[in-house]
Image (spheres, helix red, strand yellow):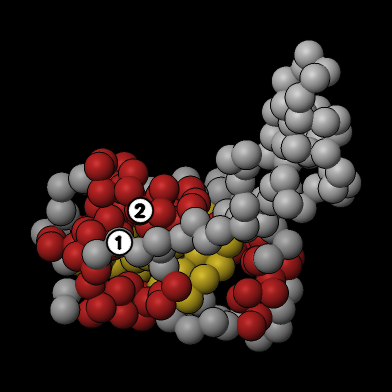
Amino acid sequence: MPQVALYNTSGEQVGQIELSEDIFGSPVNKTVLHDAVIKHLAGLRRGTHDTKTRAEVRGGGRKPWRQKGTGRARHGSIRSPIWRGGGIAFGPHPRDYSYELPKKVRRLAIKSALSSKVKSGNILVLEDLKLENPRVKEMLEIMASLNIGNKALLVTLDKDPNVFYSSRNLPGIKAIQASGLSTYDILNHDQLIITKDALAKVEEVLSR
């Protein structure tokens, strides 16, 4: 069963905490991780691209020349896709790129992402994280005491406004609540900082 150190906000180790073997010690499935990341990025696409068909391009209502006798090829409209300035035959149109993955695949991807952080030593568990007021300076001091780099994901049990507002202006630091934890966010940040109660919630949900 994997173990990690438990720290307070002053950067002092206050103990050890055991992690669930099924969640944080599972094999890293790269195929599932790739599927989860591509699914996330597909959902971010706006899909607002649009091209005009020959019916939407302005003009072209009159036949450019008579059908026979000119020696030229027959045409019915100057807005045909084969004409310069004409419509686009098979261009993109607005669409939704998002799709769903099976529930078991999503859970396996999160387990693989969490296991990869444990194996690389880039997970840090905090005993608690409470701020009296939203202060960026105080959050900077906490990050410095924990030796956190430029890109870290901060996970709390609930969305604490003080923690959220104190970290949102710090480049590379993203604060989320445990219920919003995603494979993409875990992989997109170098370090994972999670509070003790948020860790218990993640283990409870993923062990069902």
Quadrant the N terminus occupies: bottom left
Q: What amino acid is at disc 2? A: Ala
Residue 88 in percent (x, y) is at: 68, 39
Q: Residue at x 56, y 68 (%)?
A: 175
Q: Are marks 2 and 1 in contact (CB under 8 Å)?
A: yes
Label 1: which secondary element: loop
Q: Residue at x 46, y 69 (%)?
A: 155
User: Which residue is denoted by mark 1 in the rendering?
Assistant: 101
Residue 147 in percent (x, y) is at: 53, 50
Quadrant the C terminus occupies: bottom left
The total number of labels drawn is 2
Which of 144 and 199 lies nearest the eye of the viewer?
199
* Residue 99 quadrant: bottom left
Q: What amino acid is at disc 1? A: Leu
Specify few, some or many for label 1: CA neighbours under 10 Å numbering under 14, 14-19, or 20 or more: few
Which of 53 and 132 lies nearest the eye of the viewer?
53
Specify few, some or many for label 2: CA neighbours under 10 Å numbering under 14, 14-19, or 20 or more: many
Label 2: which secondary element: helix
Q: Earlier in the sequence, mark 2 or mark 1?
A: 2
Residue 67 in percent (x, y) is at: 76, 30
User: Which residue is denoted by mark 2 in the rendering?
Assistant: 36
